[in-house]
Image (spheres, rainbow, N blue to C red):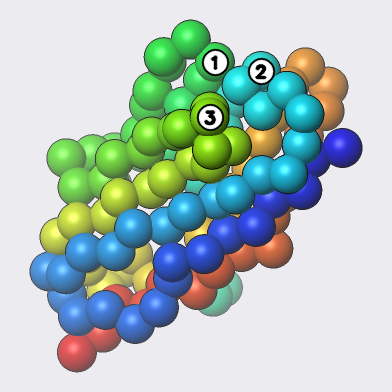
């Protein structure tokens, strides 16, 4: 079993920065691909960024050049650095772990971008 806890969300002004963290309590964390998703009110949940076991990284077009995903396997933690934030980035952000047929979700952290 994998348990995921997101943190670092909050209220930020447009153009500002925020760093989200996802802490995992599990064995074999390094075997899991880790994702960040987000869901805005009235919208479908969308994939924001992916970091795999062997260095594969990909981003949604809407966040390329602004967001950076990283992981520290020694700390069982994945991060999402968010720069140049826009109001349309407002959403609940979810951490997601995948290994073969197993997958796990965190409970989410709210990010609000507003003046």
Looking at marks 2 and 1 on the same chain, the residue that comes earlier in the sequence is marked by 2
Q: CA distance from mark 3 to mark 2?
A: 12 Å
**Number of labelled discs?**
3
Q: Using a 10 Å C-alpha cutoff, classify the residue at mark 1 as few (fewer than 14 neighbours), some (14 to 19) or many (20 or more).
A: some
Q: CA distance from mark 2 to mark 1?
A: 6 Å
Check disc 1 and report the residue beneath it: 53
Furthest residue to the front?
Answer: 74
The answer to whether mark 2 and mark 1 are in CB contact below 8 A is: yes
Furthest residue to the bottom?
Answer: 115
Q: CA distance from mark 1 to mark 3?
A: 14 Å
Nearest the eye: 74 or 62:
74
Q: Using a 10 Å C-alpha cutoff, classify the residue at mark 3 as few (fewer than 14 neighbours), some (14 to 19) or many (20 or more).
A: few
Check disc 2 and report the residue beneath it: 31
Which of the image's four quarters has the N terminus? top right
Looking at marks 3 and 2 on the same chain, the residue that comes earlier in the sequence is marked by 2
Identify the residue at horizontal 19%, vertical 80% (top origin). Answer: 13
Q: Using a 10 Å C-alpha cutoff, classify the residue at mark 2 as few (fewer than 14 neighbours), some (14 to 19) or many (20 or more).
A: some
Looking at marks 1 and 3 on the same chain, the residue that comes earlier in the sequence is marked by 1
- Residue 110 screen position, x and y as percent: 50, 74
Identify the residue at horizontal 45%, vertical 33% (top origin). Answer: 71
Residue 35 visible at all: no
Nearer mark to the viewer, of 3 and 2: 3
- Residue 53 screen position, x and y as percent: 54, 15
Splitting the image into 4 quarters, where does residue 60 fall?
top left
Residue 76 visible at all: yes
Identify the residue at horizontal 37%, vertical 38% (top origin). Answer: 69
Check disc 3 and report the residue beneath it: 74
């Amino acid at each position: 079993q994998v348990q995921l806890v997101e943190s670092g969300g909050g209220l930020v002004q447009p153009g500002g920065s925020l760093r989200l963290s996802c802490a995992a309590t599990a064995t074999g964390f390094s075997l899991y691909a880790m994702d960040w998703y987000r869901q805005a009110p009235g919208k479908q949940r969308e994939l924001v960024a992916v970091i795999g076991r062997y260095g594969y990284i990909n981003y949604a077009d809407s966040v390329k050049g602004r967001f950076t995903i990283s992981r520290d396997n020694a700390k069982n933690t994945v991060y999402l650095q968010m720069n140049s934030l826009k109001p349309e980035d407002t959403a609940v952000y979810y951490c997601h772990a995948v290994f073969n047929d197993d997958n796990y979700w965190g409970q989410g952290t709210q990010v609000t971008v507003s003046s």
